[in-house]
Amino acid sequence: MLYLFLDTNSRPTIYLSVQIFEGATHVNVSHVIHDLSFGPKYPGIHNPLDGTERILRGASGTFKYYIKIVPTEYRYLSKEVLPTNQFSVTEYFVPMTESDRTWPAVYFLYDLSPITVTIKEEHRSFLHFITRLCAVLGGTFALTGMLDRWMYKLLEAIYKMS
C-alpha cells in the first residue's frame, strides 16, 4: 500500500511524484470502503458507504464523498441511551485529463447537522394491533365497495349504449 502526501506548493514533491507515476493520469485511486461509521452501531442502522467498491480501469480522477452527519440518540426499551451518528452521502467522480494541473485523490468532506434525531424502541399494545387491523380491513372493504360501484356503473353505461 502506498501513501502519498503531496504539497502542491513544493515543486520537488511534484517532480518526484511525476517521476514515480509518469504523470497524474497514471495514478490509480481505486478503493474499497469496508466499513465507515461515525459512532457505535445500533439495531437497524444502514451506513450507505459500507461495502462501496470503486475500481478504475485505464482512467484516473478524483472521488469526492460529501457526507452529512446527523447526531442520533438510540433509546433502548431499558431506557439506556446510545449516543451515535448516522449519515447520508453524495458521491462525485471527476475524470482526469492530460491538461489537468491537479492530482487524483479521494476526498471525504463532511458537514455536521445541528439537529439531533432520537430513535426509541417501543412495545405496542394488543389494542394498538387490533386498531390497526380494523383500519386495514375497513380500508379494504371501502375500496372494494367503490370498485364494485364503478364497475356496476361502467357495465350499465355499456349496456345502455348497445
Image (cartoon, grey):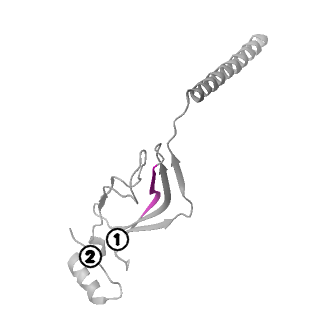
Residue 95, given in percent of the width and then of the height, sits at 38, 67
Number of residues whose C-alpha sits closer than 10 Å to that of mark 1, classed few (under 14), some (14–19) or many (20 or more): some
Residue placed under numbered mark 2 in the picture: 4
Which residue position is annotated with label 1?
A: 105
Residue at 27%, 71% (x, y): give it.
27
Q: Where residue 63 appears, x then y in whole percent?
A: 38, 65
Residue 75 is inside the magenta segment: no
Q: Specify the amino acid type for callout 2.
A: Leu
Q: Is residue 89 magenta?
A: yes
Span of residues in magenta? 80-92
> Which residue appears at 25% of the width and 73% of the height?
3
Residue 15 located left or right of residue 96 = left
Is 146 drawn above or below residue 46 in the view shown? above
Dot 1 amino acid type: Ala
State how far apart marks 2 and 1 are (Cα): 10 Å
Residue 145's label in the rendered image is: none
Determine the residue positioned at 51% across, 36% down.
Answer: 123
